[in-house]
Amino acid sequence: MSAHDDIGDRVRLTAPTIYEIVSTEGESELARSLHSLGWSGLVAGLCITFSLLCEGYIKYHLPPGGDYFLIENLGYTFGFIIVIMGRFQLFTENTITVVLPLLETWTWRNFFKTLKLWGVVLLTNFIGTFIVAFLICHFHFFSPEMLDILNDISMHAVDQSWLQVFQMGIPAGFLIACLVWMLPSADGGAEFWIIVLMTYIIAIGDFTHIIAGSAEAFLLLLQAKVSILQVLSFLSAAALGNILGGTGLFAIIAYNQVRNEI
């Protein structure tokens, strides 16, 4: 290996380079058909529910009586590992990837293309999480004890005021945007650990993620433990918080730091 190649391997990506990589990914997503986006979003919704399930599995198998908060919340990262490393369409990732091209080239046409992508991905993510919640409730995959644990985890997330959910959704959206921004710099197995670290912070911070949280909300709704109004309140607050954190804060900050260099 030449000295030039060795230096190239060690030099970190610059902010404009990362911006261009993420923005190019966003342009690629905007160019995909609604059919492809929809199926990818559906798979993401199905897979993200493993965040709830794995957290429940760990909690179920831990000895009773102890405080295992930091351990059980490791389970929350599993759904995100599957979705992000599988390159499926998750709504919160798109609060930065498809927004960067829009900020660079603002037109009403691009704006409505972004909204259309958001709508398709959000809807299909919800369909995926709803399907899994329905299967859990009606096909008795879990023991009553395990279901109680899943309900406790879900109620902890959903049973909050609109303002609380909104406020806790902002850092979650910001952290997911940070994750997306960091991935181009990840070498080897670093991508895995970046996903684990950033989503683990969301879990232990009790921050609100709209798609992972929708699985919890639908699970409670299908057992009549919460009302449809409570679910709509939770989902709207979480969505707005995630969008504000991912787009309103991180994406705009990221764009402004490189706007004179691209």
Image (cartoon, grey):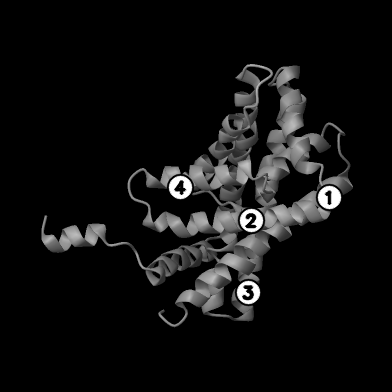
Task: Let me know if residue 45 appears in the view.
Answer: no
Type of amino acid at the residue the image marks with label 2: Pro
Image check: 216 left or right of 70?
right
Type of amino acid at the residue the image marks with label 1: Ser
Chain-order first, disc 3 or disc 4: 3
As helix, strand or loop, the secondary structure at mark 4 comes to helix
Type of amino acid at the residue the image marks with label 4: Ile
Residue closest to the eye, 242 or 10: 10
Chain-order first, disc 3 or disc 1: 3
Q: CA distance from mark 3 to mark 1?
A: 31 Å
Decide: few, some or many residues near mark 2? Use Cα within 10 Å; few <14, some 14-19, many ≥20: many
Numbered mark located on residue 194 in the image: 4
Residue for badge 1: 161
Chain-order first, disc 2 or disc 3: 3
Residue for badge 3: 111
Residue for badge 2: 171
Q: Quadrant of the image for the C terminus? A: bottom left
Decide: few, some or many residues near mark 3? Use Cα within 10 Å; few <14, some 14-19, many ≥20: some
| Tag 3 near tag 4, CB within 8 Å | no
Q: Quadrant of residue 203?
A: top right
